[in-house]
Structure formats: C-alpha cells, structure tokens
C-alpha cells in the first residue's frame, strides 16, 4: 500500500476468507490490474457501498507449503514482515486454529497510531496442498492501557495458498482496511499500490527462517 501505505496492514493481518465469503474477495469481477512487479500482480477494485478500495495480490514462491504454514501460524511475529503492523497480542485462544488478537498499526505523521481487534482462523489441508486464512474485525474488551487509542473496525483480509508445480506455492492475498478518523479515503486508497507489495516481499525474505 509511498510511505503512507498503512492500509496494507489490512490485515494485517494475517488471516483470510475462504472462497465462499460473501464479499467474494477472490472473484475476478470488476478487478483492475494495478501493478506488476517482480512476478507479483496487484489488482484493485471498489468496495461495494464505500469510497474505500480493496486489493488482491498474487505471486509464487519457490518454498515449501509447510514453511508458509508455520509462518502464517506464528501470528505474534507478524509485525516482523507485515507492512504497518507494529505489534500483535493474543487476547483469547478459541481453538488450535482460531484466536482473537489485538493488532497495533504504525501510521505516518501526522496521524495517530491505531489498534484493531480481529478474529483469525486458519485451515491447513495438508493432503490437498492448501492453506486458507480468514481475518475479520471482532468486538471485544480492550486492555485498560489501550482504551484511549483509536480503534479500526472496518478491516478484513484473506489468504489462499496452494502447492504448485516444481516446488512452488501460489499465494493469493486480498483485503481492505479503513483507519477511520481524520485519515482521508484517497490517502488510504493510494497506499494500496505499495503496501501489499512490501508485505509480500518481506514475507518471502523471512520465510527462510521457517
């Protein structure tokens, strides 16, 4: 998502919608190719009923699917590679594959940093060679020392990762985020052209550690 690309954090996040999501983040309808860079393709389209735009990114890595899975599961270290995510804190573990997290976002001056609370879930179909991740805003009680911070409530992200040929994995990442407050929508939308690219490039680099 220019240095003003905090929207890439949409997610943040780290978690995703399965193809049956009513938002249809993966469908091809109305998507417009915005940028191609280093084997990464980025599409943009309007979010229905909003001035906000959403993104969809696709690329391939020459990595093992299990390594990607281990990275995605390591949510509390997401700040090391996901653009604009400053911190991640586990609030509640629901199951081995689902939890509620508080995400901290580093916004550029003059805007204040923000937080969001999200429910994330992950599904690893090892036999089928696929990973699905869903993330969505989830209303919950905030820690006392964070109650003064601006809260992001419009945020969704998704990942679909599958095994390809010759040791490659195909990665599709989609989502959106509205920081709200005094951050203008045009600035949020502008950030979509660089933030997701930074995220996926950082992800590729850190994968060697998994």
Image: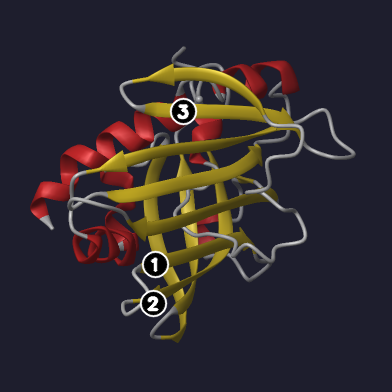
Dot 3: within a 10 Å radius of its alpha carbon, few (fewer than 14), some, or many (20 or more) residues?
Answer: some
Measure the alpha-carbon separation of dots 2 and 1: 5 Å
In the image, residue 31 lies at what x, y percent? 69, 31
Check disc 2 and report the residue beneath it. 125
Q: Is 110 left, or right, of 132 in this rendering?
A: right
Q: Is residue 126 above or below residue 53?
A: below
Q: Quadrant of residue 205?
A: top left
Q: Nearer the viewer, residue 135 or 22?
A: 22
Q: Seen from this angle, which residue lies furthest bottom?
A: 95
Mark before the other along the chain sequence, 2 or 1: 2
- Quarter of the image with the C terminus is bottom left
In the image, residue 100 lies at what x, y percent? 51, 71
Mark before the other along the chain sequence, 1 or 3: 3
Of the numbered discs in the image, which one, if any, rests on residue 130? 1
Q: Quadrant of residue 199?
A: top left
Pointer 2 with pointer 1, Cβ within 8 A: yes
Check disc 3 and report the residue beneath it. 41
Residue 99 in view: yes
Pointer 1 with pointer 3, Cβ within 8 A: no
């Amino acid at each position: 998502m220019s240095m003003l690309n905090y929207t890439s954090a949409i997610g943040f996040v780290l978690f995703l919608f399965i193809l049956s999501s009513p938002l249809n983040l993966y469908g091809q309808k109305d998507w417009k190719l915005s940028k191609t860079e280093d084997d990464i393709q980025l599409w943009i389209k309007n979010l229905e009923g909003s001035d906000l735009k959403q993104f969809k990114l696709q690329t391939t890595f020459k990595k093992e699917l299990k390594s990607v899975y281990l990275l995605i599961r390591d949510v509390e270290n997401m700040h090391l590679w996901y653009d604009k995510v400053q911190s991640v804190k586990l609030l509640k573990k629901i199951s081995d594959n689902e939890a509620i997290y508080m995400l901290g976002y580093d916004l550029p001056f003059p805007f204040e940093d923000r937080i969001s609370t999200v429910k994330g879930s992950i599904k690893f179909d090892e036999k089928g060679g696929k990973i699905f991740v869903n993330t969505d805003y989830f209303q919950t009680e905030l820690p006392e020392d964070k109650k003064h911070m601006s809260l992001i409530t419009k945020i969704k992200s998704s990942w679909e990762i599958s095994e390809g040929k010759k040791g490659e994995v195909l990665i599709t990442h989609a989502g959106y985020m509205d920081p709200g407050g005094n951050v203008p929508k045009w600035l949020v939308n502008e950030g979509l052209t660089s933030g997701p690219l930074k995220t996926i490039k950082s992800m590729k680099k850190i994968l060697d550690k998994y």
